[in-house]
Image: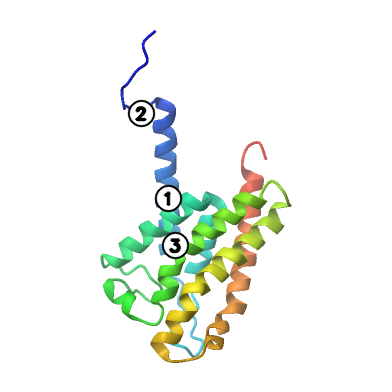
Amino acid sequence: MPISTSSAPTPTRSRSTSTDLALIASFAALIAVLGIVPPIAVGLPVPITLQTMGVMLAGLILGARRGALAVLVFGVLVLVGLPLLSGGRGGLGVLAGPSAGYFVGFVLGAYVTGWVMERLADRVPVVAAALTAAVVGGVAAVYLIGIPVLVWRTESTAMAGLAFLPGDLIKAVLATAVTAGVRRALPGR
């Protein structure tokens, strides 16, 4: 029997790709919707928003690759001008402000969150895996880029960036609770 050299996707592959695209688009939309919630000012030119929680959820639920792609889709939509960031911001100008590092760090945050979750999910209870992943990826990885840019753009100290820590830890706990609920609802879990 000859081996097919056709590059047409098999029905299973096509369904998987369609599902991946739908999930990526859905989480990009979720991050945008979380931007509708008004930002909370903390005395810095960068507010606290719920969009970081969307980044955490993308990594926790979709995994590293698809979570990062969802955030990347969201980011591209913002950069082409859609006002999807909290406060109705969008366009290339977001890369010139003090929050640019957090915005760029979202992709890394989702990837690291998903990567950690993928490594821990079958080894420790889901709550411990999700909380660890959300803190390491959704907080620390985002801060890795966000705080240096904040310091550079505002000439403040790195300690100023820690003003976001209490809110981000609360978002990590909420993202963990949502992830645990989603995992319980999945068939075969």
| Front residue (pair 62, 5) | 5
Disc marking residue 90: none
Residue at image x 37%, y 15%?
A: 3
Q: Mark 2: which secondary structure?
A: loop
Residue at image x 39%, y 38%?
A: 18
Q: Determine whether, in the image, residue 135 is placed left or right of residue 10.
A: right
Residue at image x 47%, y 88%?
A: 44
Residue assigned mark 1: 24
Cα–Cα gap, marks 3 and 2: 28 Å
Residue assigned mark 2: 9
Dots 2 and 1: beta carbons under 8 Å?
no
Q: Amino acid at mark 1?
A: Ile
For residue 35, say whether it is visible.
Answer: no
Residue 174 screen position, x and y as percent: 62, 64
Residue lying furthest top in this view? 1
Q: Amino acid at mark 2?
A: Pro
First in sequence: mark 2 or mark 1?
A: 2
Q: Mark 3: which secondary structure?
A: helix
Q: Amino acid at mark 3?
A: Val
Disc marking residue 107: 3
| Front residue (pair 37, 179) | 179
Instruction: Give the image quarter of residue 32.
Output: bottom left
Circle nearer the viewer, 1 or 3: 3
Dots 3 and 2: beta carbons under 8 Å?
no
Q: Residues within 10 Å of mark 3 (few under 14, many from 20)?
A: many
| Front residue (pair 73, 35) | 73
Cα–Cα gap, marks 1 and 3: 13 Å
Quadrant for the N terminus in the image: top left
Q: How is the image coloured?
A: rainbow
Residue at image x 50%, y 57%?
A: 111
